[in-house]
Image (cartoon, grey):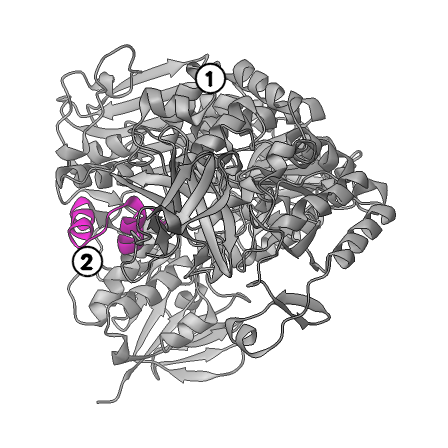
Amino acid sequence: MSNNWTKLCSHSDLIGHSGICALVDDQQIALFYLPEQLQVFAVSNYDPVGKANVISRGIIGSSGDDLFVASPLYKERYRLTDGFCLDDEALSLKAWPARIHDGQVEVQLAA
Amino acid sequence: MSKLKLVVIGNGMVGHQFLQSLHDSGESNKYDVTVFCAEPRLAYDRVHLSAYFSGSTADDLAMGNPEMYQDWGLNVLIGEKVKKIDRVTKTVISSADRTLEYDKLVLATGSYPFVPPVPGHERQNCLVYRTIEDLEAITAAAQNAKIGAVVGGGLLGLEAAKALKDLGLETHVVEFAPRLMAVQLDEGGGAMLRHKIEALGVKVHTGKNTQLIDDGTECVHKMNFADGEKLETDLILFSAGIRPQDELARQSELKIGERGGIVINNQCQTSDPDIYAIGECALWNNQIFGLVAPGYAMAKVTVSHLIGGDEQFTGADMSTKLKLMGVDVASIGDAQCRTPGAKTYSYVDEPAEVYKKIVVSEDGKHLLGAIMVGEAEDYGTLLQYALNGIELPEHPDSLILPQRGDAEPAGLGVAALPESAQICSCHDVSKGDIQAAIQSGCCSVGDVKGETKAATGCGGCAALVTNVVNHELEQLGVEVNRDICEHFPYTRQDLYNLIRVEEIRSFSELLARHGKGHGCEICKPAVANMLASCWNDHVLESSHVGLQDTNDTFLANMQKDGTYSVVPRIAGGEITPAKLIVLGQVAEKYNLYTKITGGQRVDLFGARLEQLPLIWKELIDAGFETGHAYGKSLRTVKSCVGSTWCRYGVDDSVGLAIELENRYKGLRAPHKIKFAVSGCTRECAEAQSKDVGVIATENGWNLYLCGNGGMKPRHADLFATDLDKETLIKYIDRFLMFYIKTGDRLQRTSVWMDNLEGGLDYLRQVVIEDYLSLADELEQQMAAVVGTYQCEWNTTLQDPEKLKRFRQFVNSDESDSNISFVEERQQIRPATEDEKNQFEPIRMVG
């Protein structure tokens, strides 16, 4: 099962409490990092409302127990764990499992 | 059934209110209405006429407009007078020789200013103060005048004096009576008012009977008084009272009072039952009512009678509260203590320049009247005692004595008011009406004002309306939660104070000590902003970078397609041709859309994330620095060209604008801040629509604060006049830091001011008089920010760690393929979704 993890960048490329973006084929992936928990999250970078590739530039935060990223364009909040929108259930981002492994950031693109 | 013909003569404030009431009644379709408006414009707010000199325009003051009247189905004849009423044929004949029939006629002809028959009163530049045309004449006359005198020290006279002062004249008030505002004030109150007004630079002459006006030696006119004294002046304004405009009624032989005024009954009918008279032309019970509220009441009664109702006019309270040249003055009921057996209590605070008096009934149980000068916060409470006959506390003097220590205020709680208590006298809104509005869903003072019109007339009841609304909301269990978000149980102001007092320098520290969770898109940028206001670290320090909105993160403004716009600082709007060429070259090289902004600089659009450092490298090499267009911070200081080039300029507005912009650039605040500096009163820089506006005068700089354009425009308030530059900067330092300290998140200064308890006066106390002993601290805090300024782009370009953020992909050098442009008017614009699907996009350059 460890075969389908894709390496995107090194751990040191991540920016704590913020996001960066990686490209795999034509897919833009936003990566968010919580350094205290050593947790990394991967969701699609395309904002379905603003129709632009900007999600990685949003602010991350928490609402109750949910961690989210708020779109920098129109502020919809998407849950980091599964991409569901907290403000409009018709909206969602793609989300992929992500991890830090051997100093590298990896995502599992295929289910 | 055919409609009845209703003719209304006069379209002043009361005439307008009549039309409004008729429309609101829902039964206006019973009448075909024709309105004669003798003035060249429809009704406007005469109560706030002096605002015309501090920036308001005729449009700002307007109450009626042609479209609205048309919607109401009225036939309005502007600039047309009625010259005759024929009661036998029931017709009116106009100045345009139009003859109209009427079934019912309403006279709302108002009043005219009384000009004492002093020899010389008809000389040039001897004017009156009532209409906008009068104001225009006064403005024109003031152009060539140095000294102005107002004849009349009553309410209107002092308003007129304010106007002259605003026009920059040396101002004198000449009053026949031994004191100012003789009708409303007693000797002590008049003396205090005089003292305060003289401190503002207006010279007051009481007990002066003008006998002759002739040629002056220094000035145009010389006023010769009965006591032998003389006063030279260039301009004379008569404001010695009003007389009812009853000429038409006299000609048509309606019953007229001995000293003028059209006699009316409780239904506002004149001696001819088909003719009504309302407002200042009407005489009820031998009284003329020179205030707007009784006129509005008459309008309402007349409408009621016209549509078959039974309302009656039974007199009106003449209590009044107003601000004369910034001085609070209030008078209630029997202020002169004329009721037999009545007793008074008075309180004088000479250092604070406050005078208060109450008049109570013989048995000490009821309030009959009151006078307040210098401070009138208790007006609402005292008025309710007087109007509703509420029994006084055991020691009535507690109502006017200052509250010190922990003593409970003696003020009347709004809970004690009966439902019938009239809260707003201008629009006759009772406590019950406010309760009903809240029951029907109003949740704020703003909602209630919109629904009931309370506090929208003279505004004297605003504080009371707020108290009633808040009390009623509390009764309903509505709690207004002012916490900034779920992560911090504090307001922005609380958090700011915590950051200052505990010297907290990072979000994580603040969250650990005072919050919970991870923060969010609300609290993070707000805290980042406060940390910047306090400590001024670079916003892209690693502990701050995750807090910033995307605009601050990338030091540029994100546009709808995810590209950014770039705005270098062009202080004061002054730029060399060489630098202007660089902007053009950079824009051309990176194929950026170029637009001139409202703040006198150039905005370059369509930059991709990864292009930002390249673009800024070139700009900084050419001598530009960041413009902070992305921050909640000082944006621009707009200026006109000023005395350097302009034929009319009186001071160097560009020089001051550049100095101010360089002083405050980089300062983070609750919201963006805009300044402007104008070199003369023509105000080409539009300073009065800015958070901070400065206008040059012959004697220094006038400072205006808390203006705004945008969604809800607000004219800035004149804060201080004729300042030297040092004082000006000191006041702006204190003002900005006080706003930063107390403003709410994303609250512009205009809204902040509207919500500031005590308003402009309070702000003056804090900034000018240092009432809170904060001035030194605020100045030091500003000095710290000014002293730690850095160009955020310059610092970023020198730090590879910070630059890491400026690439589209961490693992690829490709660009974002979703960004594409099409050409429009020889420049790029973002392609629409349809265009992206249909066309091959323009190739990006650079």
When the figure is inspected, residue B247 is found, relative to residue B727, above or below; the finding is below
Callout 2: chain: B
User: Are the residues at dot 1 and dot 2 in contact (C-beta closer than 8 Å)?
Assistant: no
**Which image quarter holds the N terminus of chain B?**
bottom left
Left or right: B103 as drawn, with respect to B392 = right
Residue that badge 1 annotates: B771
Residue B657 position in % (x across, y down) = 72, 37
Residue that badge 2 annotates: B312
Spatial distance from mark 1 to mark 2, Cα to Cα? 49 Å
Is residue B34 visible to us here? no
Is residue B75 visible to us here? yes
> Mark 2: which amino acid?
Gln
For the residue labelled by badge 1, is the local secondary structure a helix, a strand or a loop? Answer: loop
Point out the tag, 1 or 2, that comes first from the N-terminus. Answer: 2
Q: Determine the residue positioned at 86% across, 49% down.
A: B577
Q: Is residue B432 magenta?
A: yes
Left or right: B555 as drawn, with respect to B146 = left
